[in-house]
Amino acid sequence: VRRTAVTSSRSALNGYQKGRCFYCYDEISIAPGSENSTEVDHFFPWKLKKDGVILNVDGIWNLVLSCQECNAGEGGKFARLPSAFLLARLHKRNNYLIDSHHPLRETLMRQTGSTTNDRKDFLEQEYNLAIHSLIHTWEPSPKAPATF
């Protein structure tokens, strides 16, 4: 199983995140080579695709912008599953993009469902599959805000 390049989604994702890390809310930049350069992270780790648990981990529904520290720094997420609190944030983000008639609206709806309840059920189902495959979950540093 090969990894798919997902960096082209930075601009689209930044429209919602407005220059902030999805996990810890620190400032990030989508400009190449900047000091606080962002990384496109798989919320549900790519390992789940490799293991055959979740096949569409490269879908826009699962991609978020992350600071380097949260993604792969000391104490970073790596291949761990984010907490259920962050799953709710992902659901909120996906609904925001759909409700705002973002250009990715139709893609998100095809990937996750046409109604808010369908999308919530989809994420919960994927989370339940993932939690049984991955041993560890992950929380960002305590500085993260309660909502985005």
Image (cartoon, rainbow, N blue to C red):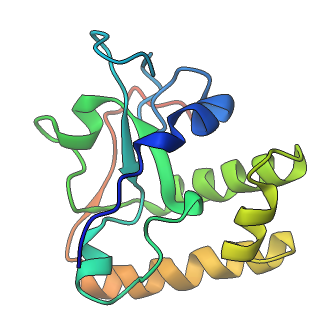
Instruction: Give the x, y percent position of residue 55.
Output: 42, 83
User: Does residue 148 show up?
Assistant: no
Residue 2 quadrant? bottom left
- Near-viewer residue (119 or 38): 38
The residue located at (21%, 68%) in the rendering is: 136
The residue located at (51%, 24%) in the rendering is: 20
Query: Going by the picture, which residue comes out furthest to the top?
Result: 35
Instruction: Give the x, y percent position of residue 84.
Output: 49, 63
The residue located at (33%, 40%) in the rendering is: 140
In this rendering, is residue 120 above or below 31?
below
- Near-viewer residue (88 or 19): 19
Instruction: Give the x, y percent position of residue 117.
Output: 81, 76
Which image quarter is the N terminus in?
A: bottom left
Q: Tell whether 97 sits left or right of 10.
A: right
Q: Tell whether 103 sits left or right of 1.
A: right
User: Does residue 20 show up?
Assistant: yes
Instruction: Give the x, y percent position of residue 39.
Output: 34, 36
The residue located at (71%, 63%) in the rendering is: 108
Which image quarter is the C terminus in?
A: top right
Q: Tell whether 27 sits left or right of 19.
A: left
Residue 124 quadrant? bottom right
